[in-house]
Image (cartoon, rainbow, N blue to C red):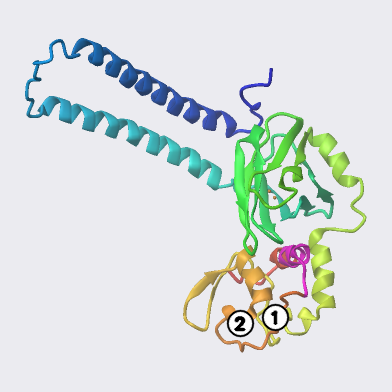
């Protein structure tokens, strides 16, 4: 017999299930109550003679208040409870292991910061909060790991963040949960949760290519980005050192926080948001860099964060 429920293998799983069971219990309780009362009253007040006429009833305050207040309280409980679970799922902790995910017809591509790349298999350590920064290079996919109770649409042209903290080593199914074409059903994989020491061993085996940030650094040179984005503030483009996570002022006077989406947009559509004090002279790199290369460039810009800076805060 197939199990009724997927196993619980993440910190959020029990909370999601508790809410689900509560909703189920409420639905069963009222479903039975209402069906039972319909049958009961149908029998009790059925017409006994052809001439019988029912008594007229002009409302009842007690009933009105009861069936207004009771559902209100129940829905408020559901709302507050649901919102708290949602917020817990939406906000990753500060310290996370970051991994990039690119969905594609019909496979999942994973890019670890240390340089490892995987397809349809994702290795993570147990007990550590993992943050996935996902995007798609074609259509909408959906990243779904039932055992983690984690599910989110993976969208082209955007970075959607998903996080989870696995609690048990093992292999867990990964599905695409958005119909994405002929072989959607084959767009499956496994998340392999390992003991931390095993994970370290796995991580150290085959990182010959170097880190994602170093691949980005090389690409940064190859695409000649460094001719304008120079570290000495003399370049024709904004200085990228220490930029990630900061808020910059645009020509329009608006401000924007430098995150993955902003870096991506600035590479693909440079003229969309010009930093105040600069000219819109940067060419677009649309079609010249792949999703994976974009991720490498973003990771490189992030890594410039670590450079020691002279009290610039
Ligand atoms: Cu990808 Cu369905």
**Front residue of 212 and 101:** 101
Assign the magenta stretch its main secondary structure: helix
Spot occupied by residue 213 in the image (x, y as percentages of width and height): 79, 62
**Front residue of 303 and 18:** 18
Q: Which residues are magenta?
A: 288-299
Classify 308 as above or below 89. Answer: below
Name the residue tied to disc 2.
271
Classify 297 as above or below 254. Answer: above
Which quadrant of the structure image shows residue 45?
A: top left
Spot occupied by residue 293 in the image (x, y as percentages of width and height): 78, 66
Spot occupied by residue 109 in the image (x, y as percentages of width and height): 78, 52
Mark before the other along the chain sequence, 1 or 2 = 2
Name the residue tied to disc 1.
284
Q: Residue at x 47, y 80 (%)?
A: 253
Query: Element type at marker 2?
Result: helix
> Is the C-beta separation of discs 1 and 2 under 8 Å?
yes
- Left or right for 107, reference 17: right
Which quadrant of the structure image shows residue 130?
A: top right
Image quadrant in which the C terminus is located: bottom right
């Amino acid at each position: 017999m197939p199990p009724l429920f997927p196993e619980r293998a993440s910190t959020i799983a029990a909370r999601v299930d508790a809410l689900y069971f509560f909703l189920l219990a409420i639905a069963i309780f009222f479903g039975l109550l209402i069906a039972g009362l319909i049958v009961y009253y149908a029998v009790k007040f059925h017409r006994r003679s052809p001439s019988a006429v029912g008594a007229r009833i002009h409302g009842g305050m007690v009933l009105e208040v009861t069936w207004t207040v009771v559902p209100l309280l129940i829905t408020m409980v559901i709302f507050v409870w649901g919102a708290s679970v949602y917020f817990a799922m939406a906000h990753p902790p500060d310290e996370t292991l970051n991994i990039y995910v690119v969905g594609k017809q019909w496979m999942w591509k994973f890019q670890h910061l240390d340089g490892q790349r995987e397809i349809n298999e994702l290795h993570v350590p147990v007990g550590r909060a993992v943050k996935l920064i996902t995007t798609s290079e074609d259509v909408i996919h959906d990243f779904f790991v039932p055992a983690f109770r984690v599910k989110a649409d993976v969208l082209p042209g955007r970075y959607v963040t998903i996080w989870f903290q696995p609690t048990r080593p093992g292999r867990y199914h990964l599905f695409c949960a958005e119909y994405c074409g002929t072989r959607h059903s084959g767009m499956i994989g496994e998340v392999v949760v390992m003991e931390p020491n095993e994970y370290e061993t796995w991580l150290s085996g085959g990182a010959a290519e170097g880190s994602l940030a170093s691949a980005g650094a090389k690409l940064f040179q190859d695409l000649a980005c460094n001719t304008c984005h120079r570290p000495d503030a003399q370049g024709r483009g904004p200085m990228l050192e220490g930029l990630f996570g900061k808020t910059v002022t645009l020509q329009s006077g608006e401000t924007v926080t430098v995150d993955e989406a902003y870096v991506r947009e600035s590479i693909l559509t440079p003229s969309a948001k010009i930093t105040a004090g600069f000219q819109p002279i940067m060419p677009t790199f649309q079609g010249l860099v792949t999703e994976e290369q974009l991720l490498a460039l973003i990771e490189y810009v992030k890594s410039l964060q670590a450079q020691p800076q002279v009290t610039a805060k």
